[in-house]
Amino acid sequence: MMSSYCSSLTKYKRLKTREVKVGNLIIGGNNPVRIQTMTTTDTMDTAATVAQSIRCIKAGAELVRITAPSKNEAENLQNIKDELHKRGYFTPLVADIHFTPNAAEIAAKIVEKVRVNPGNYVDKKKFEQIEYTDAEYAEEIERIRERFTPLVLICKEYETAMRIGTNHGSLSDRIMSRYGDTANGMVESAMEFLRIARLLDYHQIILSMKSSNPLVMVQAYRLLITHMQDEFGECYPLHLGVTEAGDGEDGRIKSAIGIGSLMEDGIGDTIRVSLTEDPEFEIPVCKDLVERYQTLDMRYEIQENLLQPSLLLDNEEIKRTSKSLSHAEGFGDSPLFYSPFEYNRRNTLQVNNIGGKNVPIVMADFMMAKSIAAADLSVIGYRYDAAIDKWNIADAAADYIYTANKLIDFALPGTLSFICNYTIWNIAVTDVKKCFPLFTPYEFLGAEKKHATLNFISVCVDVDNTALIKKLHEEKSVVLCIYSAKKNAMQQMRMFINDITNQKINYPFVIAVESMKTTIDAQLIEFSATAGGLLLDGMGDGIWLINDPAKIENNVVSGRTYLAATNNYQFLNNTSFSILQAVRTRISKTEYISCPSCGRTLFDLQETTSKIRNVTNHLKGLKIAVMGCIVNGPGEMADADFGYVGSGVGKITLYRGKEVVKKNINSEVAVDELINLLKESGVWIEQEIIY
């Protein structure tokens, strides 16, 4: 039986890891979570790399990673380091190594840390399936030991730290042959290298388990922790990141789900948010993530809330009753109903179109709207055409609207219904086909009138819900909208779901998350880490995001502005669908696996990604990878359906899955050639023009 992957499942507590010295910085132990990024300049351009490094350091980077794909770049790290020191900057530098052990050995004598990828440092990846006997496999491990040992000895001599950084997409053919394309394979790939280092008494090691799929990433880190604890009795520091996250909101959401889900449980000693943007723009997102967890170790601290007592109990009541919870100190005797190391969606009853085998629903929050007209629904995916009296319904169209104490007096499209508070539903609703009640637990316990098929109950998990839980055993047609006003809301909701599931109550849950943060970036992180963390573990049959647009001071993300009124509904709706897409539970749009660029990039990655997005963003469910170079190409984009990869200066190679289809195309026509490939593959559809 594996040990737990974190210090506590019920309250925020940092996982204790071994301390590692990186230059003048200590990572792990009780030290703060460190922020880092990676330059995108040509490493041979010393001036440009130094200038960009300084911008990153001024923005808050505590480590700066620089690519060193060959001997020349590795040697030039000395010039970069010398110039930074000359200008008064002593931030540790990290050399990023992929295929070239010689470059790693040079870099380890210059910079404070080297990063190696076990998938391609010694092994090769040709997408070949080879059956290994145990003896043959052992021979391969010995070959790795012989090639990896010189680097370890250099690092010991020069007191250089090392990151053993496994990437899901670049697992070697040898690992794939035995473990498959799995989180277990990622862990074993790193453990092989870690065992060699430990035998040489070298411990200045940090590890990472990166993937473009947050689900795989989170499972891999959890497995790695348990394997280290079971085998070594200790855990080395962990670098967190979602690789190829992309840009804009999607990149931030995917990163916040992967990184935030782990940090919720106290996991992570250093982080990088990999965005297809200039590296200094990654730093504010990292800061928001770190700040969120710096103040999380206050178990009973209550956050400010927007919702009225009809939905949320007031904060004083929560404070009075929080410590009376039977599960206040943990899961107690209640075992985990799920495995944190593999995805299985919680089995629930189907109530109307919620739960069962249905995709999670999206609830649009119109609580603060003064009134609701047909035109207002355009921002949540419904556009009414009065000329033909028809609704145009988008793929990312909300399923329910919460109106609080307002009623809707016009005909809704067939796929949309609304929810109002029980007090108004009970006295004013006559047509119950499109309108459903939201009860507080107190209202539900005393209600004589209920809907025949669907009743929502708002449940604050921070208080004693014993009476409601007893009542639920007698009820049907119930959906629970759960929320927490505590800072560790994800853990509180997870604890409640676990307890109630173990009591054989299998109603669907809608995950309600309210953010009072003052920036869009911070709200994206709170929504994504809380709701996404639960959805990654198969908990949740719907999502309901809530905020107060009047309190948002900075409403710009990557050039997109969200106005404080109408477009806030669009922001919440887009974020809901983006979270569901990132956790792979509801696909509503094209997914882009886009690397963050580095000195190896062979074209303008940001401009090209934007161009590809503009012409393909209507291809729902398709995964398209945009990779700056061949290093991040076939391996890193292994999860993609199609790939656009830099193969030389001004040259692009196109992939269908892992297959090279068109090689060395001129970049001027490569986007058109990608469209032709999509057409040839039968996945292209013409984009609808809406007037």
Image (cartoon, helix red, strand yellow):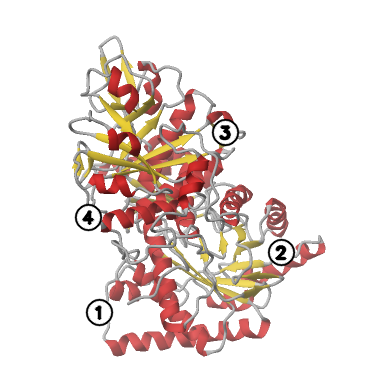
Asked whether disc 3 touches disc 2, contact meaning CB atoms under 8 Å apart, the reply is no
Question: Which comes sooner in the sequence, label 2 or label 1?
Answer: 2
Question: Quadrant of the image for the C terminus?
Answer: top left
**Dot label at residue 131:** 1
Q: CA distance from mark 2 to mark 1?
A: 46 Å
**Dot label at residue 599:** none
Amino acid type at circle 1 is Glu
Q: Residues within 10 Å of mark 4 (few under 14, many from 20)?
A: few
Q: Secondary structure at mark 2?
A: loop
Q: Which residue is mark 3?
A: 555
Q: Give the answer, above or below, for where 501 lies relative to 99.
A: above
Amino acid type at circle 3 is Asn
Question: Which comes sooner in the sequence, label 4 or label 1?
Answer: 1
In this picture, residue 47 sits left or right of residue 668: right
**Dot label at residue 504:** 4
Amino acid type at circle 2 is Thr
- Labels 4, 1: front one: 4
Q: CA distance from mark 1 to mark 3?
A: 54 Å
Q: Give the answer, above or below, for where 242 lies relative to 528.
A: below
Q: Residue at x 63, y 63 (%)?
A: 32
Q: Secondary structure at mark 4?
A: loop
**Disc count in the image?**
4
In this picture, residue 100 sits left or right of residue 281: left
Q: Residue at x 22, y 23 (%)?
A: 432
Question: Which comes sooner in the sequence, label 3 or label 2?
Answer: 2
**Dot label at residue 91:** 2
- Labels 3, 4: front one: 4
Residue 78: which quarter of the image?
A: bottom right
Q: CA distance from mark 2 to mark 4?
A: 54 Å
Q: Give the answer, above or below, for where 216 lies relative to 668.
A: below
Asked whether disc 1 touches disc 3, contact meaning CB atoms under 8 Å apart, the reply is no
